[in-house]
Amino acid sequence: MNISYNAPKKRFTLNTAHTTYAFEIWDNLYPVHLYYGPKAVITHGFKPEDFNSFSPNPNFNNKSYSLDTLPLEFSSFGNSDYRTPSVQIEFENGSKITDFIYEGFEIVPFKAPLKTLPASFSHEKDEAETLILTLKDLISGCKIELYYSVFPHTDVITKSTKILNSSQETLKVLALASGQIDFHHSNFDLIHLCGAWARERDLVRTSVHKTAHAIESKRGASGHHQNPFMALVDPNTTEFHGDCYGFNLIYSGSFKHQLEVSPYDQFRVVSGLNPFNFSWVLLPDESFESPEMILTYSANGLNQMSQNFHHFIKQHVLSPSFAYLERPVLINNWEATYFDFDEDKLKALICSAEEMGAELFVLDDGWFGNRNDDTSSLGDWFENPKKLPNGIKAIAQFAVNHHVNFGLWVEPEMVSKNSHLYRAHPEYCLQTPSRPQTEGRNQLILDLSNSEVCDMLFDNLATLLKKAPISYVKWDMNRNMTEVYSERFNQGEVEHRYYLGLYALIKRLTTAFPSVLFEGCSGGGGRFDLGILHFMPQNWTSDNTDAVARLKIQYATSLAYPIITMGAHISAVPNHQTGRVTPFSFRAHVAMSGNLGVELDPTALTENDLTALSEFIKLYKSHRQLIQNGSFYRISSPFENTLTAWCFLSSDAREILLFAFRPFKIANMPLKKIKCPYADENLNYGLVSTSFEDTKPEAFSDIHGSQLKYDGLYMPHAQGDFKSCYWYLKSF
Ligand code: DGJ
């Protein structure tokens, strides 16, 4: 039993392998948070007298405590808790006051799916347990169900919330959090991932002491600017040591983590759909469910938190048929040709792909309608006869005949004004009557809250996928929402209904084409979130393919997401986003640390460079299982150090692939050893291979695990910038 209930104390304890989460029902009224942290036996609660304050007392006889100071599992609005509530409902008379109190609970030995949204799942009974706590607002009769699912093996607890309108009137839900936690102190650093296009997921660490923060998106997408992942850590926490709490949401639209410090130094986190511009009409007997929030606690620093997330995501969020499936080495023509290609050019790229050992050729933007730049044709998902006179089928078949699978880029959620689709159905776009439509990258957004639009997209995409041997789809989305409006619904529902439509569409497609690998993309990593990953098991990490920039982007992305979800491509120099010229080995080592792709024109390479690329792809394939399905650990951060280091470990720790990168040379540089804290101190490791360029480490035959762990290795000395090397170590 991972969830237990102490009836006399009305106390619930949720245990995972290494963590405990506990709360109890006070006065038979309010669920009060007791504890979340390392595994512990919680035998003591609190006394009401400890929770007096200047704030009013609850609306029941003789209550001396204040809700405003109670650490609550769920808080209502207007009932004397002045902090951010978990729910806000507008009744027909305009009142928004509720007071949800405990009604009962149920424990079930599984994790049920959500009805409308992507969510985590358990494969077998006993892999997860769920506590469903029911609360009731006595005046209106409305109910709340709080879902707590415990995944003991990965140290993850998920939360979600459902509201049921058991009143007699029509309600408007103005806010409904996925989960709330009231920590008993605020001595935390907040770690979050913010950025912009081509600069996604910059790791920011800041003290939260006595300050309110919001990590959010209001853009109609999880976005480039803030990722739904965040962590609260002890100020002394490092990658290797210390307390940390990780949070994420299985959602792709506007979200919010509201963080608030009370005057009593308690710290509230309320996470879920962004209440900004949100409202949902709920008729009597209808219900509404929130996205799922995932939570983990690690006592061993950020690396352990990431391990928990990585294992959980692979085991319980990604589609089981792809979660552990080795990803193909792909070549994508975007940076090789942009819009400027014809069939002969593509054939040449495919032949080079075969020669270099790539397994998948991806035809990116520009193959359809009359698209020669970004001003037209989105929505017209049929081939451009000028570029592909023999059609998609012929070029896909050409690839397959050359032992390379074929993949295709689409951007189904969008439409160009200059397209057949827009001319035939201008009403299919998100738009507000009598207001101009704001374009982004010359495109408008289709209204996926309209099922007719989703059906049309399904038919068009299914026709395309049936027409040719297509084994991969890159699903792009290159702008955020404006003029969000629909004649069908209350306006506060439209964005969320868009995501319900999108998820249902992708689910239909992935069910109809179960062997097609989908890769999510949004101008690079603008929708790198668990909602998309649930259906599309990998994502294009960033449009920035510069290896120096990628060190930070990939390092920070790995805090929350497993390596097997990250696309990483070797591109040409000078790099198209930064103009930087880095050597092949440096680019290769960075790209090798994800799902490897090639994004350059191999027909423009010298024979020597092409050979180096083929050799490198061979090398990648020999380590692919370890990279994609091993455990990834960060060792030295590019955000703090001149040296970046990370490693991949097999599950028995017998194989280690250790990388070191030194992007910029410093004269008379201080020396720093790279330790591998996750090596097994009881094993001896033989050095099987090392990198091949001018940073080739000094040869040694073996090294003991304890030395790797406590002493480490020096990165070889070399003059110049952009140096990298690796050690592949194995204990036989
Ligand atoms: C943005 C993506 O991130 C790129 O990789 C490429 O597919 C372009 N869109 C195509 O328009």
Image (cartoon, grey):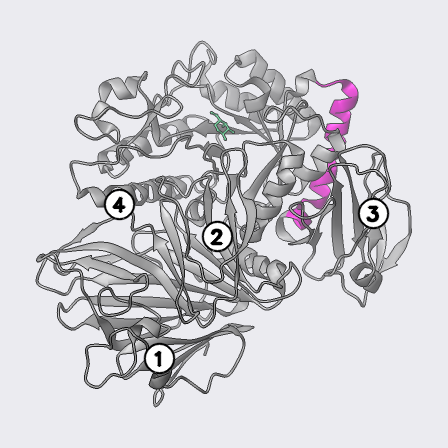
Where is residue 50 shown, x and y percent of the image? 38, 83
| Up-down relation of residue 541 to residue 73 (above or below) | above
Provide the residue span drawn in magenta. 605-627
| Up-down relation of residue 669 to residue 286 (above or below) | above
Kind of residue sitting beneath label 2: Phe
Q: Nearer the viewer, mark 1 or mark 4?
A: 1
Q: Earlier in the sequence, mark 1 or mark 2?
A: 1
* Farthest residue, direction front: 54
Q: Is residue 341 magenta?
A: no
Quadrant assignment for the C terminus: bottom right
Q: Residues within 10 Å of mark 1 (few under 14, many from 20)?
A: some
Residue corresponding to mark 1: 51
Residue corresponding to mark 2: 229
Is 428 in front, or is 272? Answer: 272
Residue corresponding to mark 3: 670
Look at the numbered disc 3 and give the secondary structure of its residue: loop
Q: Nearer the viewer, mark 4 or mark 3?
A: 3
Q: Quadrant of residue 653?
A: bottom right
Look at the numbered disc 1 and give the secondary structure of its residue: helix
Look at the numbered disc 2 and give the secondary structure of its residue: strand
Residue corresponding to mark 4: 277
